[in-house]
Image: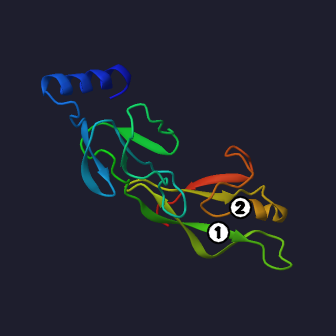
Amino acid sequence: CTGVQCLIKQWYQRRVRGTSEAALAKCLVNGTSTDCTTKCLGPKYDGSLATGVTTQEQACAAAADTVCDAATCAECTTDDCNVIPTVVDYKCDDYEVKTDATAITVKTPQVTGKKLPDTDGACKTPSDTAVVGDIALFSGQAVCMKFADDNAKCVTVSSAGR
């Protein structure tokens, strides 16, 4: 719930149930379901290479108006709604230019990324217009570093079948 909805729900729980600290929801805190009178906070999927999720802790907010940064934090008010997103590994090619080479080539091992189950991860790959001097701008699963997604030197391909 948000704003007025949250206040009405809290008022109802306090007045009708006759308690000043009625739980609004049960939030997961370090994986344990815990009564909460405000709102639940939890991590979001962010596709990062290390874990695939943000560093936001599972928590019960200190106050109903606790700020939850939309980019890194998920907030909710239903029982055990702040679960850590499930992620799975996928592979993308990484690239190199060998000594005295004139072309960008695929190197091993592949880069391991994180994606949501039943989805394809996005791999970035040099296009035909990328040149050897561009190699420092490419890094497997990561974005084509300094290239915008619509840049002709950077192509996004599906990780399906990798």
In the drawing, does residue 127 fall left or right of residue 72?
right
Query: Looking at the image, which residue is at 34% across and 37% down?
Result: 39
For disc 1, the marked residue is 94
Number of residue marks: 2
Is residue 120 placed above or below 71 in the rendered structure?
Answer: below
Q: CA distance from mark 2 to mark 1?
A: 8 Å
Q: Amino acid at mark 2?
A: Phe
Q: Which percent across, then down, holds residue 20?
A: 22, 30
For disc 1, the neighbor class at 10 Å (few under 14, some 14 to 19, many from 20) is many
Position of 64 with respect to 161 (left or right) is left
Please name whichever residue, 62 or 130, is drawn nearer the observer in this view of the structure: 62
95 with respect to 131 (left or right): left
Q: Residue at x 33, y 51 (%)?
A: 83
Residue 101 percent coordinates (x, y) = 83, 76
Image quadrant holding the N terminus, namely top left
SS class, disc 1: strand
Taking the spot 62% from the left edge, 58% from the top edge, the residue there is: 142
Residue 138 tag number: 2
| Nearer the observer, 71 or 133 | 71
